[in-house]
Image (cartoon, grey):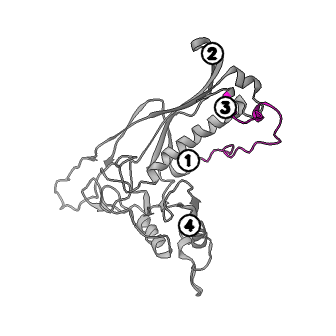
């Protein structure tokens, strides 16, 4: 996009004189970036990364005295490849626009460019969370299925479901906590988790507050304790990028194998240079970044509803 003096189409050329007391620019707000709460961050220096999956040894067997001891090999799964993408944006401003414009300065546009680049990353990453039952955006997890799926496959061929498909409430949140408490590994061994983050659509903010903030059982008149918060240190997070009013997930975000991830080689930069082509005296301001989001291991994400 090129900004020149024809940009101001008003009769009195307000933007080139001090005629206006204030310009209300609603896009001049801090960048809304929430992906760092919803993903695990992975730094990289390479455009292409590979992630593997395997399962260690099974449980020990009882054998007779003098009997031979069985040996086993780890089970190897199919690896996943992640290739980062380049996102870029820029603008040009003519010498006349830079000289005479009183309100839309290069500094303001450069600040806006930085904000747009940050939000572009946040919006792009949100595609994963808004398509949890699909492989369209994040691709498939290690087992080849979408993040939310009722028959995820372990490496020993057993299955598990991390998809509740139920509205947020006492019963559905209890089911989510039980899922994490009875979670299994790739050998079907129980590996109790410690879920810590309940992420919800803004419409469900107050439900989350009531579910997690009450000392007594919510939505009842009895004197029972709120068991939802007794053994788990849960926090709620309002995810403003969620597009479905019923969307919610329960994450074991602190687990070392938590996924989804965002791989970043380069955060948004700003480059200002003269646009010398054609000797126009215009100034070009550009920004670029390299990143990619991906779903790998699904079991640390319980999808309540999409």
Q: Which residue is mark 1?
A: 36
Magenta residues span 6-32
Question: In the figure, residue 208 lies in which quadrant?
Answer: bottom right
Distance CA(mark 1)–CA(mark 3): 37 Å
Distance CA(mark 4)–CA(mark 2): 53 Å
Distance CA(mark 3)–CA(mark 2): 17 Å
Q: Residues within 10 Å of mark 2 (few under 14, many from 20)?
A: few
Distance CA(mark 1)–CA(mark 4): 21 Å
User: In the rendered structure, does residue 8 fall within the stretch colored magenta?
Assistant: yes
Tell me whether the residue at label 4 lies in contact with that at label 2, contact meaning CB atoms closer than 8 angstroms. Answer: no
Secondary structure, mark 1, is helix
Q: Which residue is mark 3?
A: 7
x 40%, y 46%: residue: 137
Q: Which residue is mark 4?
A: 204
Residue 240 seen from this side: yes
Question: In the figure, residue 107 lies in which quadrant?
Answer: top right
**Mark sitting earlier along the chain (1/2):** 1
User: In the rendered structure, does residue 75 fall within the stretch colored magenta?
Assistant: no
**Mark sitting earlier along the chain (3/2):** 3
**Mark sitting earlier along the chain (1/3):** 3
């Amino acid at each position: 996009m090129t900004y020149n003096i024809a940009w101001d189409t008003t009769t009195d050329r307000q933007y080139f004189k001090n005629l206006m007391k204030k310009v209300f620019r609603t896009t001049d707000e801090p960048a809304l970036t929430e992906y760092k709460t919803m993903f695990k961050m992975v730094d990289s220096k390479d455009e292409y990364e590979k992630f593997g999956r395997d399962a260690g040894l099974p449980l020990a067997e009882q054998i007779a005295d003098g009997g031979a001891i069985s040996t086993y090999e780890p089970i190897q799964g199919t690896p996943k490849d992640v290739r980062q993408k380049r996102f870029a944006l820029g603008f040009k401003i003519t010498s006349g626009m830079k000289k005479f414009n009183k309100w839309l300065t290069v500094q303001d546009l450069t600040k806006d460019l930085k904000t747009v680049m940050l939000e572009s990353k946040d919006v792009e990453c949100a595609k994963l969370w808004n398509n949890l039952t699909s492989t369209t955006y994040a691709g498939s997890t290690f087992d080849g299925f979408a993040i939310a799926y009722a028959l995820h496959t372990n490496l020993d061929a057993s299955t598990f479901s991390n998809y509740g498909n139920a509205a947020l409430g006492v019963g559905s949140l209890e089911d989510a906590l039980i899922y994490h408490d009875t979670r299994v590994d790739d050998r079907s061994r129980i590996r109790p988790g410690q879920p810590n983050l309940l992420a919800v659509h803004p419409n469900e903010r107050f439900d989350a507050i009531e579910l997690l903030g009450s000392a007594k059982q919510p939505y009842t008149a009895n004197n029972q304790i709120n068991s939802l918060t007794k053994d788990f240190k849960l926090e709620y997070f309002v995810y403003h990028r969620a597009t479905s009013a019923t969307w919610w997930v329960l994450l074991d975000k602190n687990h070392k194998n938590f996924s989804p991830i965002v791989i970043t080689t380069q955060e948004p930069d700003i480059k200002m240079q003269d646009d010398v082509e054609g000797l126009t005296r215009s100034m070009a301001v550009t920004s670029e970044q390299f990143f990619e989001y991906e779903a790998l291991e699904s079991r640390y994400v319980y999808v309540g509803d999409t």
